[in-house]
Image (cartoon, helix red, strand yellow):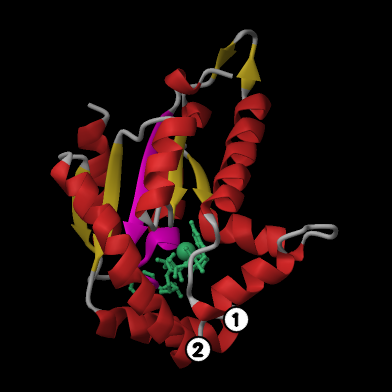
Amino acid sequence: FDYNKVVVIFVLGGPGAGKGTQCTRLVQDFGFCHLSAGDLLRAEQHREGSDYGHLIRTCIREGTIVPMEVTIKLLQNAMGAAMKESRIGDGWTLETGRFLIDGFPRKMDQALKFDETVCLSSVTLYFSTTEEIMLRRLLERGKTSGREDDNVESIRKRFNTYKSDTMPVIEHYKQLSKLVEVDSSGTVEEVHALASSVVRRIFS
Ligand code: UP5
Ligand code: MG
């Protein structure tokens, strides 16, 4: 299929910044196809016959980044599947050609490789807030999420990786004038109002 017809918005922000929550809301507003790199990795981790289960589990618990080849392949497959499903005659529906890619790219090598082998992104939505707020949200979620990385020890490691590996990606898109920062400190509703007005502006 034709990656040139695809619109990709990257969604970045620290652990617990609210990426997943806001993506769900943006899907309701604009009909994007939402792909969370973390969710795809967790699904692959549990897939029977996967060669990567052990590697993914270790990286997620340690808050380190899974080698980019694995994640990019999963994203490509998921994008392909979404495009195929949405096939109408010989065209594609507009909505499913629009992707919100959540939690990716979180390291420079992934960003460059995705540009080169999949497509260029239109814009990056960057949800920013303080570590204190992110920690509080993650610990609260950890009471029921069952996520192996929602404990203080893993959260600290995720924050470190975010600062060392993901901040340079955010800087990179800022340099390219392809970054839009959204303060995600407020309530879900407040952040959603900011995020949806940004997206509306981009597409108008
Ligand atoms: N919540 C959300 N918004 C709120 C608000 N405004 N007010 C109050 N509460 C709010 O939200 C987190 C929690 O906060 C929820 O309980 C929510 O209800 C509440 P969520 O929307 O889930 O935040 P999100 O930013 O999506 O947090 P998440 O934990 O998913 O972020 P991470 O970036 O840490 O996790 P991800 O799943 O993307 O990645 C996990 C791991 O996978 C990584 O650490 C890494 O090891 C691996 N990975 C890779 O290796 N490569 C990749 O490309 C991607 C991931
Ligand atoms: Mg998430």
- State the image quarter where residue 138 is shown: bottom left
Residue 181 seen in render? yes
- Residue linked to disc 1: 148
Residue 188 seen in render? no
Instruction: Tell me: is circle 1 under 8 Å from ligand 1.
Output: no
Q: Amino acid at mark 1?
A: Glu
Q: Is residue 15 left or right of residue 204?
A: right
Q: Residue at x 50, y 89 (%)?
A: 151
- Of 12 and 172, nearer the camera is 172
- Percent position of residue 182, x then y: 21, 57
Q: CA distance from mark 1 to mark 2?
A: 7 Å
**Numbered label attached to residue 100:** none
Q: Residue at x 69, y 60 (%)?
A: 43
Vertical comparison of 15 with 193: above or below: below
Q: Amino acid at mark 2?
A: Asn
- Of 49 and 145, nearer the camera is 49
Q: In the image as oriented, which residue stretches furthest toward the right?
A: 49
Give the SS element for disc 2: loop
Q: Residue at x 66, y 34 (%)?
A: 81
- Percent position of residue 155, x then y: 43, 83
Q: Is residue 18 magenta?
A: yes
Vertical comparison of 116 with 74: above or below: above
Q: Residue at x 62, y 46 (%)?
A: 74
Q: Is residue 156 magenta?
A: no
Q: In the image as oriented, which residue stretches furthest toward the top?
A: 90
- Percent position of residue 9, x then y: 36, 40
Q: Is residue 94 left or right of residue 18?
A: right
- Residue linked to disc 2: 151
In magenta, the rendered stretch is 7-21
Verify CB contact (< 8 Å) between mark 1 and mark 2.
yes
- State the image quarter where residue 67 is shown: bottom right
Quarter of the image with the C terminus is top left
